[in-house]
Image: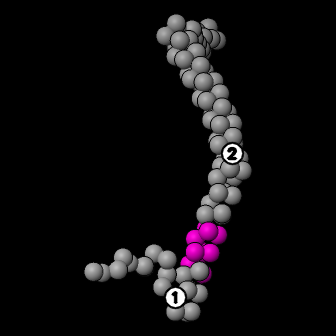
Amino acid sequence: MATPGQGGKRSSLSRSSSNDSEGILSRISSGVSQSPIVYRGKRAASDAAYVTKRLLKSTGKAAWIAGTTFLILVVPLIIEMDREQQLNELEMQQASLLGTPPLGATAAPLK
């Protein structure tokens, strides 16, 4: 039969060995997390995220300015150029139907 003293020693030994292994793991993990290298890495990642966020925000503003400027200034120009081209094509069709030579087709008389 086991005596009460021996059972107590065994359970205290097993407890102390599990506490030692947890202590070692916790010491290693806390030592690593408090390392200056880890701190610098976390700080660099945080700074990179901040810069990226600011860059995307400013890029978005620039894209908005460029897009609205394009819509206000360039799109009406494109529409007017298209109208002018359609008008020229219409004049050429009317001239060919009426029998007059188109403006660009007149050649210098031959001698």
Seen in the picture, residue 102 relative to 17 is either above or below; the reply is below
Amino acid at pointer 2: Thr
What residue do we see at 64% from left, 69% from top?
Answer: 83
Q: Residue 4 — which label?
A: none
| Residue 23 visible here | no
86 in magenta? yes
Q: Quadrant of the C terminus?
A: bottom left
79 in magenta? no
**Where, by quadrant of the figure, is residue 79 drawn?**
bottom right
Dominant secondary structure of the residues highlighted in magenta in the image: helix
Q: Circle 1 sits on which residue?
A: 100
Q: Residue 98 placed where, x, y %?
A: 56, 92
> Callout 2: helix, strand or loop?
helix
Q: Magenta region: which residues?
A: 82-90
Residue situated in front as seen by the camera: 82 or 46: 82
Q: Residue 69 — which label?
A: 2
Disc 1: CA contacts within 10 A as few (<14), some (14-19) or many (>=20): few
Residue situated in front as seen by the camera: 13 or 96: 96
What residue do we see at 43% from left, 79% from top?
Answer: 105
- Tell me which label, 1 or 2, sits earlier in the chain: 2
Seen in the picture, residue 70 relative to 52 is either above or below; the reply is below
Amino acid at pointer 1: Thr
Residue situated in front as seen by the camera: 6 or 68: 68
What residue do we see at 52% from left, 88% from top?
Answer: 100
Considering every residue shown, the one lying at the far left of the view is 111
Q: Quadrant of the N terminus?
A: top right
